[in-house]
Amino acid sequence: MNSEPRGLAVIINNHKFAHLRKRDGTGDDLKMLWDLFTVLSFKVEAHQDLTAEVSLLCIFCKTVTLFHTAACDDSYCSTSICVYSDDN
């Protein structure tokens, strides 16, 4: 994989939930993932506090856009999408 950027990393970081407690520390998690993907030469996007429906829409739209882009040129070799949560 020689492209620069290597690909796109989409991070969905949910700190606030409608019916659950806040997830303190998500800012630290986001920074660590952002730094990791940046070091790996990915373009990074972060989205905050998305509902499940909006998260799926975001993932779908990014995937369709990237497959269309890949069909037109070789700007990205790969895509990573991170959705993370604690064990509750």
Image: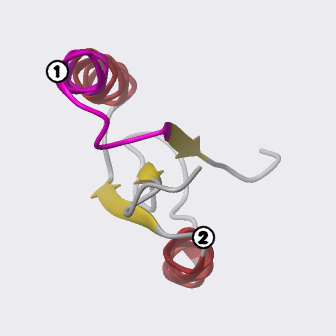
Residue pictured at 58% horizontal, 80% vertical: 39
| Labelled disc at residue 8 | none
Instruction: Give coordinates of residue 49: x percent, y percent.
Output: 33, 52
Q: Tell me the residue that label 2 is attached to.
A: 40
Residue pictured at 49% horizontal, 80% vertical: 27
Q: Amino acid at mark 1?
A: Cys
User: For the residues marked 2 and 1, what is the alpha-carbon distance in whole angstroms?
Assistant: 24 Å
Residue pictured at 35% horizontal, 62% vertical: 43
Q: Amino acid at mark 2?
A: Leu
Q: Earlier in the sequence, mark 2 or mark 1?
A: 2
Instruction: Give coordinates of residue 31: x percent, y percent.
Output: 52, 82
* Secondary structure of the residue carrying numbered label 2: loop
66 drawn magenta? yes
Q: Residues within 10 Å of mark 1 (few under 14, many from 20)?
A: few
Is residue 55 rendered to the left or right of residue 14?
left
Residue pictured at 60% horizontal, 70% vertical: 40
Q: Based on the displayed image, in which of its 4 quarters is residue 24 positioned? A: bottom right
Q: Tell me the residue that label 1 is attached to.
A: 72
Please report the bounds of the magenta region as a residue range: 65-78
* Secondary structure of the residue carrying numbered label 1: helix
- The colour style of the image is secondary structure
* Location of residue 18 with respect to 37 vertically, above or below: above
* Location of residue 63 with respect to 5 vertically, above or below: above
User: Which of labels 2 and 1 is toward the front?
Assistant: 1
Question: Is 65 in front, or is 71?
Answer: 71
Question: Is 8 in front, or is 60?
Answer: 8
